[in-house]
Amino acid sequence: MKSVPGFWDKIWRADVLERVLASAETIALVHHDGAVLVGFACAHDVGFRAYLSALVVSPASQGRGVGTHLLAELERRLAARGCAVAIADVWRDAEDFYRSQGWAPPAVVLLRKRLAAGRQEGTA
Ligand SMILES: CC(C)(COP(=O)(O)OP(=O)(O)OC[C@H]1O[C@@H](n2cnc3c(N)ncnc32)[C@H](O)[C@@H]1OP(=O)(O)O)[C@@H](O)C(=O)NCCC(=O)NCCS
């Protein structure tokens, strides 16, 4: 994730990956090229729908079908669990990739709110 310029978000907690993997109902996949991890994807079955939270392929391995394979396998596993809909907030640069895999804009609006992360009850 850190090999892709701009992908790693500094607002994420230091243990973000541990949290992702420990989160209930997470499906996480990696793609290896020998001993080198070149792709990562994860999604979360949150009941009403599934949320695709990460799909990334290292720059040196992009364009070789790794992303297609990881996304298809995530979709297969979610469908096997009975998930009928998956959503994702995707990079604009990657929009055409997702569209080529059958993804399309839903008839809803995506909103976001920045939270006061780290400020706990009783602190300023
Ligand atoms: C987007 C990404 C996951 C695609 O994975 P990949 O392994 O490079 O993709 P594939 O090799 O499976 O490509 C499948 C097809 O999509 C095309 N494609 C790949 N990335 C694309 C992009 N960003 N925009 C448009 N088309 C793209 C490929 O050219 C290929 O087309 P073809 O079948 O006609 O040859 C990967 O390029 C990546 O990690 N990019 C940087 C991070 C990112 O954008 N992640 C998604 C954030 S939501």
Image: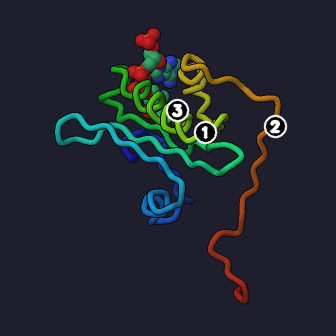
Dot 3: element: helix
Residue type beneath disc 1:
Gly
Residue 8: x and y, percent? Answer: 47, 49
104 sits to left or right of 77: right
Residue 75 marker:
3
Q: Residue at x 67, y 77 (%)?
A: 119
Residue at which label 1 appears: 82
Asked if the residue under mark 1 is in contact with the one under mark 3, i.e. CB atoms within 8 Å, the reply is no
Residue 26 marker:
none
Q: Which tag is nearer the camera, tag 2 or tag 3?
A: 3
Q: Which tag is nearer the camera, tag 3 or tag 1?
A: 1
111 sits to left or right of 12: right
Residue at which label 2 appears: 109
The answer to whether 43 is drawn above or below residue 93 in the figure is below
The answer to whether 36 is drawn above or below residue 10 in the figure is above
- Closest to the observer: 72 or 108? 72
Displayed quadrant of residue 94: top right
Residue 95: x and y, percent? Answer: 60, 25
**Residue lying farthest right?**
108
Quadrant of the rendering where the C terminus is positioned: bottom right
Residue 75: x and y, percent? Answer: 52, 32
Displayed quadrant of residue 52: top right
Q: Residue at x 73, y 89 (%)?
A: 122
The answer to whether 90 is drawn above or below residue 48 in the figure is above
Asked if the residue under mark 3 is in contact with the one under mark 2, i.e. CB atoms within 8 Å, the reply is no
Q: Residue at x 51, y 65 (%)?
A: 13
